[in-house]
């Protein structure tokens, strides 16, 4: 199993999770982070670090978020690794509680 970044990360991209990852499995896109499923060791240290609760173990993903398993796998092959915390997106606080923002995902 692996962990998956879900929709609530879109347009926020808080990177608190990146600092604690022991295997550098996060990849960075323009307005979203993903987890490389081939690198994730299922340690779960990233989960409590996410201020928008955007990371879950694959087996706990709600039905309406299942597409993010494939999104993480696909985009992790295209996006570069991120290993150090960065500032969140400038309008992250405005987007953190917005639901249904898949259409905002910049690939």
Image: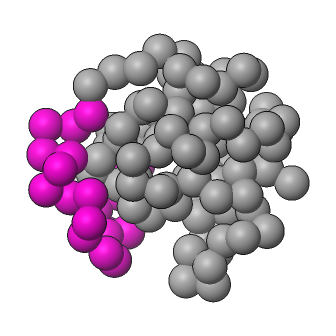
At x 22% / y 37%, what residue is drawn? 89
Foreground residue among 44 and 12: 44
Q: Residue 84 at what x, y percent from top left?
A: 47, 15
Q: Which residues are magenta?
A: 88-107
How many numbered discs, if any? 0
Q: Residue 92 at what x, y percent from top left?
A: 20, 47
Seen in the picture, residue 14 relative to 97 is either above or below; the reply is above
At x 59% / y 32%, what residue is drawn? 26
User: As drawn, which residue projects farthest toward the bottom?
Assistant: 63
Q: Residue 6 at what x, y percent from top left?
A: 52, 60
User: As drawn, which residue projects farthest toward the front?
Assistant: 48
Q: Residue 12 at what x, y percent from top left?
A: 29, 47
Q: Main secondary structure of the magenta part?
A: loop
Image quadrant assignment for residue 29: top left
Seen in the picture, residue 9 relative to 8 is either above or below; the reply is above
Is residue 78 something one can see in this rendering? no
């Amino acid at each position: 199993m692996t962990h998956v970044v879900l929709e609530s990360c879109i347009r926020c991209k808080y990177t608190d999770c990146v600092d604690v990852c022991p295997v550098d499995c996060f990849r960075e896109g323009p307005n979203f982070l993903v987890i490389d499923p081939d690198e994730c060791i299922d340690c779960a240290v990233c989960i409590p670090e996410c201020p928008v609760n955007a990371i879950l173990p694959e087996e706990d993903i709600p039905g309406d978020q299942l597409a993010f398993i494939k999104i993480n796998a696909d985009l992790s092959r295209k996006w570069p690794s991120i290993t150090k915390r960065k500032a969140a997106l400038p309008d992250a606080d405005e987007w953190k509680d917005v639901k249904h923002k898949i259409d905002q995902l910049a690939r």
